[in-house]
Image (cartoon, rainbow, N blue to C red):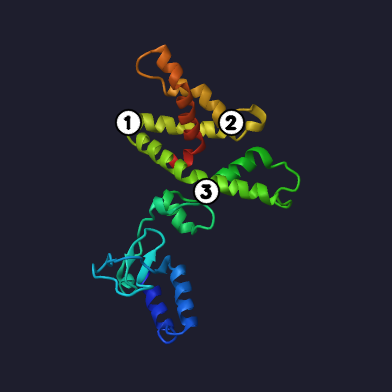
Amino acid sequence: MFSQELWLENEKKCAVVWKSKQGRKRQELLAMALGVMIHTFRGPHWCEYCANFMWGIITQGVRCSDCGLNVHKQCSKHVPNDCQPDLKRIKKVYCCDLTTLIKAHNTQRPMVVDICIWEIEAKGLKSEGLYRVSGFTEHIEDVKMAFDREISIADQRLETVHEMLMLLPPAHYETLWYLMIHLKKVTMNEKDNFMNAENLGIVFGPTLMRPPEDRTLTTLHDMQYQKLIVQILIENEDVLF
C-alpha cells in the first residue's frame, strides 16, 4: 500500500545516498516496508498513474505487492494508499503481510488462525506440553504447504458460497446463520459427541439442501455436494456470514 507521508520521508532520507550501493539497498528496504518494491520491467511499460512511458533498462519504477499497480517512483507518492489486494497475487498464507492477507480475504484475521485455534480447542487443550513441546519440522512444513496449496481453491469456493448466501431472503439468511452458529458450537465438543463438521453435513445436508422436486436419483446424486456445502458453512461460519 502506498503512503505519501512515508514516501516523502523516504525520499528525503535517501536523496543523498541514492547513488551509492548502500543507499539503493536502503531505498529497497523502505519500499518493501511500504508494500511496494522497486521493479525492473521487461519490455515496454507505461506508468498506470501518469500514463507516461517508463524509461530505463533496470529499476524503471515500482510495483505494489498488494494490487500489482505499476508506476514511476515519483508517481507512487501521489497514488492513494487504499488499494485492494488482488487474490490472484496472494499465493500463500505464510510469509505474507498480515494486513494484505486479511484485506485480500475480507476477514478480520487470517483464516489459518481460526482453523488452528479451533482444532486445538476441540482436540488438544488437554494435551501434555501444549505449546511447550515443539512439533516435528517435517510435519509443520506439511501443514504449511497444505494451507498454501489449498488457499486459492478454498478462496474461490468460499467466495462463490458467500455470493449465493447474499441472494437468500433475509429470513432465510438469518435462520441459516443462527443454525450454523449452533452447529459450530456442536463441533467444538467433538471429543465428547463425535460430531464434526463433516458428520453434521451428512445429517443436515439433505434437509437444508433438499431439491424443490422429490426425485430419488437426483437426491442421491446430490448428497455428497449437500454434505460438502453444509460442512463449508459450519467450518467458515464466521467468514461467510
C-alpha span from label 1 to label 3: 35 Å
Q: Which of marks 1 and 3 is in front?
A: 3
Give the residue displayed 43% in from the left and 22% down from the top: 222
Q: Which amino acid does label 1 sit on?
A: Pro
**Horizontal and vertical percent position of residue 155:** 44, 43
Q: Residue furthest bottom?
A: 16
Closer-to-camera residue (97/73): 73
* Left or right of 184, for residue 70: left
**Horizontal and vertical percent position of residue 114:** 55, 45
Q: What residue type is labelled 2?
A: Asn
Q: Residue furthest left?
A: 51
Give the residue displayed 26% in from the left and 70% down from the top: 53
Q: Which amino acid does label 3 sit on?
A: Asp
Under circle 1, the secondary element is loop
- Mark 2 and mark 1 lie on one chain; the one further toward the N terminus is 1
Q: Name the residue under label 2.
A: 196
Q: Mark 1 points at which residue?
A: 169
Give the residue displayed 66% in from the left and 47% down from the top: 139
C-alpha span from label 3 to label 2: 23 Å
**Horizontal and vertical percent position of residue 158:** 43, 39
* Left or right of 87, for residue 135: right
Q: Mark 3 points at which residue?
A: 148
For residue 144, say whether it is visible. yes
